[in-house]
Amino acid sequence: MHWESGATSWPADVIHGVLFAGLLVALWELADLAAVKTTPLIARILMIVGAPLSLLTIAIWGGMDMPYGVYFVVMMAMWYLLAEKTWSLVASGVVFGAMLLSAVGYHGWSPHTVMDVVVMTGAVAALTVMPWRHPVLIYLALLAVSLTSVIMNPNGMHDFIVTVTTGLLLAGYITGRARREKVWADDKERAEHDALTGALTRHGWQRWRERAQSHADTDWLFVAFDIDDFKSINDTWGHMVGDEILSQFAARLLRQCHPEDAVVRFGGDEFAWVSKLAHPELATKLTATLHAEVTGRSYETAAGLVQLGVSMGYVVGPLTDRLLEDADVHLLYAKRHGKNYVVGADTPITDADAEPIYRNELGWLADAALNLWQYCQLGTVMTSVDGRIVAVNPAFERMTGRSADELVGQSPAINSAKTTPKAVYQQMWQQLTQGKPWQGRLENQRPNGTLWWACEEIMPIHLGGRLVGYWSLVEDCSEEQQTAQSPTVPSSWLEQFSYRVAFQPIVHLADEHIIGYEALIRPSFKGEMVSPLQFFSECAQNALSIEADLACLSAIARRIQEMGFWPEGAQLFINIQEATLEQSERVELVLKQIMTVLPRSQIVLEVYEHATSSDRDWASVAKSYAGIAFAQDDFGVGEADIVRMHQRRPAWLKFDRALVSRLPVDAALQDLIAMMVSWLHQRDSYAIGEGVETREQALILQHCGVDAAQGYLWGRPSWDVPQTVSRLMTAGESPKDVAG
């Protein structure tokens, strides 16, 4: 065919180019389908051999002239479609061979054939040496080859049109395919890797295991991690700080990884580290290195430096589901034995150790209880239905003089002094077996021989209508313990702490304008942030609660004076313990510092004592603070909440976040809140909901008549407050906009 042969010649050439491109695209898509249905090797062979063989068949038996430029285009496409250089060279050789057979079969060994061979040889050499990876290069190369066809070939215009048509269509296909593969790769990355930490997700872990099955006989080190008290970090400093810690934690693990290793985030703060192990005896050394990596240095966050404790459990063996289960057993054992602890396969775990925490139906409940009871000042104990101790808190360990290692798996009788009358135990078990709680006193003995009286309240635990165990509250009510509360650290210990003050807005639910701010203390010890729960717990253990409270009040006063202003009309809510209020002269000195900036009428003292004292004359205490409003904090999680509310008659009652979080799923609780708010309003008191994080919670609180609320929905704690108070949310704003 020649350009001059007629008006229909060049359209026919275009059609030939379209047919060639369509055939090649179909073959390559078929290779992709083969990769899904068979093996990648078969798919590669089909891609490499199918296209050249089809072109050769058309050239010899198809009755259509096949320009050598089409072979060149196919060769270029192969270098884009096959990522590995080795496979690209193989494909180039096959295409070169097909072109040579086609040229010899069509022209014989003529100068034309020699020219084709020379040009194609140069093309293969150029592709081998140069990184042909930019789309512009393929168009330039295509243009050069096509122009060569026009100049050198007797039927050059035909070759030019066919080659350019085929090349342009294939270039479009390759570009679209590249975009499609990038989307697939991005989707796969998102599915297999956690966006926050870069660790594998559960789905990614399953795919990684499938690929690792080729090493089924290899010993693997599987390490399970759990960040100690991570919930308290989120509750104290917010989820943003928690996310920072998770991201840095995963980064430290990833730095220890070899290419064949894996770091997995199973959820929350639960991570795993998996590595091929050449020598099993190296497991202890490697896990010690990992523990030092994740705990040895503080984590830098927006809230300051945070020091973590991390519990770890590890096992060595073939990569099976049993390996994962065994690692979890060791991890839970580590958490139960003081946390920030590493337990490996060489640590003996008896059936008495493992059964209550892992296989027993109380296992999950015991793990939750350990977190809930961590800072409780009363001793707390959970026992299985057969009378073995499943979990104890630190307060009970101190009470008994025995560690959790010594107590878990034993009968509670391990603490008995053997002097309590048998009738007491008979009456106790009679009550409990009937599903009723029991209260009483038992005389116990510590390992050092000292006797003490335990005032216990034991309650049955029912799951699914069945009795599965018991939980107990224990208080040391012996005379020695009541009179001897000597601190174990000097009061100067408090001087090593520094205190930052954050302010969280409290909004009126009806129109969402700010009515005040709660001052929140963020303590630091020698420059490192400390959880407020941990700080006040340690102060209480060392009889320094009042001194710590006064130190925090002084820090708030200093911060207010440094600011030099307070928004007009805004209330300042300050936390204080009931016992501290009895130090009225010292408290008043601090209040006078605050009143240099804002009037007394805008100060609200939040009393956060969880236990009430029946012999405390609250009316006399309140008289010492004329003009100060009081709020009862954390209603719903303390002892004798209603008794305290009745005695104190606070101006404000704050419903704890534990109640607020359940409101959307508990209609009965909504009714209870509404009745209590009605009771408060009849006595000229007001209600505040704490820990509000969703619009649904806010609407339910408003429906129940609650007056005000605070939480992340409107704002996180901030180091400063605005000069003036105005409506927090304006028309068109969403809660997410404000909280963000």
Image (spheres, helix red, strand yellow):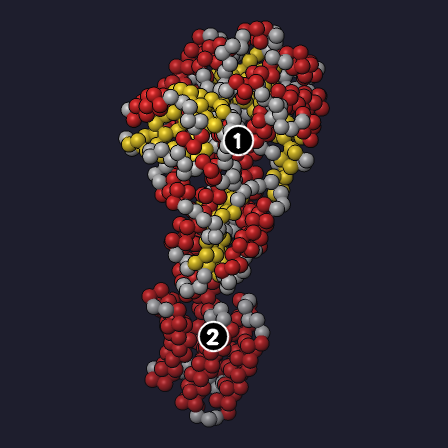
Which residue appears at 35% of the width and 23% of the height?
422
* Mark 2, residue position: 87
Asked whether, in this view, residue 603 is left or right of residue 93, the answer is: right
Please determine whether, in this image, residue 56 is positioned above or below residue 392. below
Mark toward the start of the polypeptide (1 vs 2): 2
Which residue appears at 45% of the width and 49% of the height?
348
**Within the image, what quadrant is residue 593 found in?**
top right
Indicate the secondary structure of the residue bearing disc 1.
loop
Indicate the secondary structure of the residue bearing disc 2.
helix
Asked if residue 545 shows in the view, the reply is yes
Foreground: 605 or 355?
Answer: 355
Foreground: 175 or 311?
Answer: 311
Where in the figure is residue 365, as x and y percent of width and height? Answer: 39, 35
What amino acid type is highlighted by mark number 1? Asn
Where in the figure is residue 629, as x and y percent of width and height? Answer: 57, 12
Image quarter hosting the C terminus:
top right
* Mark 1, residue position: 448
Image quarter hosting the N terminus:
bottom left
Which residue appears at 48% of the width and 52% of the height?
346
Which residue appears at 61% of the width and 9% of the height?
625
What amino acid type is highlighted by mark number 2? Trp
In 3D space, how far apart are the residues under numbered discs 1 and 2 (Cα atoms)?
77 Å
> Callout 1 environment at 10 Å: few (<14), some (14 to 19), or many (20+)?
few
